[in-house]
Amino acid sequence: SWTTGSIVEEQVAAIRAQIGEGRAICGLSGGVDSAVAAALVNRAIGDRLTCVYVDHGLMREGETEQVEKDFVAATGVRLRVVDASERFLTALAGVSDPEQKRKIIGREFIRVFEQAQAELVAEAGAAGEDVSFLVQGTLYPDVVESGGGTGTANIKSHHNVGGLPEDLEFELVEPLRRLFKDEVRMVGQELGLPEEIVHRQPFPGPGLGIRIVGEVTRERLDLLRQADAIVREELTAAGLDREIWQCPVVLLADVRSVGVQGDGRTYGHPVVLRPVTSEDAMTADWSRLPYDLLARISTRITNEVRDVNRVTLDITSKPPGTIEWE
Ligand code: XMP
């Protein structure tokens, strides 16, 4: 539309004015905000922007590829992917407590991201260039909540590789500071970003790590990823993506249930479907999904996902139940 087009033009001009001939880094999370912020800055300064995507191994099926392939194809952005899944799994070994998981994932994420930043800064420095801007997908509601300040990010790098700068200081570029979520999606659409990114439902930063009740292991992640992919596929086929707020699928990894599958008794795990409707995630109600859709999901998961022999439905509103199980 004319309005969205003018937001893009205005922001591109503002970004050019701020960055000048400089260089910038932007972290991509797979979510809509960072993707749109990156796409705007990319439109403004082209390959003087480098995006960094940390693959923590806790994403759902296809999501890393959406960033690596589809987002890059749509924008032509310069992207560095850091595969850190081994590191995250090692750090999470033996941990079941939800807050502990969050702390570990958050800590490792910052370390890996800052290491990548430091390497990019060092590489640019070696080529006689200077990376001094950091792009963030801060939205208007975040600005209001945090009191409206803007400025710089001081980053201590936790690297142990020689020759990297000890402290990095970046000036922040926040092209979404005046926008609400729906406007961000419109801008993303205007910039030609993939539908799956522009209309992605909320997904927690710690990813599937907080949807496995119990220890996070590669095998458990694989199970959950398969079950989750089936649920998303069926919800999309039923045309319900815009009706529901999100639908976590939770693996009760420490619970075992008996089943009869194929030619014998099995001793597997239950999964929980948690479809919710909500305006802002502060409160939520469980979605009254059609029974035939639930039946299809249940049949497919128990047929297609080895070791899952029971599908249950969470019918708790928020409050008292949170949206996520952890
Ligand atoms: P709860 O479970 O608190 O979730 O009702 C509310 C919304 O927040 C998301 N969520 C998270 N997002 N990091 C995130 O980035 C987290 O640790 C986290 N925990 C919950 C959840 O998916 C829902 O949209």
Image (spheres, rainbow, N blue to C red):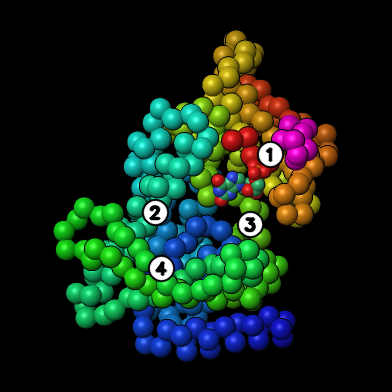
Say whether residue 319 is magenta: yes
Q: Is residue 147 above or below residue 233?
A: below
Compute the Cα span from label 2 to label 3.
23 Å
Residue type at mark 3: give it. Answer: Arg
User: Which residue reaches farthest top?
Assistant: 265
Q: Place residue 232 in its image quadrant.
A: top right
Residue to which mark 3 is pinned? 200
For label 2, count other residues whose C-alpha is less than 10 Å away and answer few (under 14), some (14-19) or many (20+).
some
Nearer the viewer's eye, disc 4 or disc 1? 4
Query: What residue range appears in magenta?
Result: 314-322
Residue 290 is situated, as x and y percent measured from the top left of the image, at 83, 38
- Please give the count of numbered marks on the rendered protein: 4
Residue 4 is situated, as x and y percent measured from the top left of the image, at 68, 80
Q: Quadrant of the N terminus?
A: bottom right
Residue 6 is situated, as x and y percent measured from the top left of the image, at 65, 86
Residue to which mark 1 is pinned? 322
Q: Earlier in the sequence, mark 3 or mark 4?
A: 4
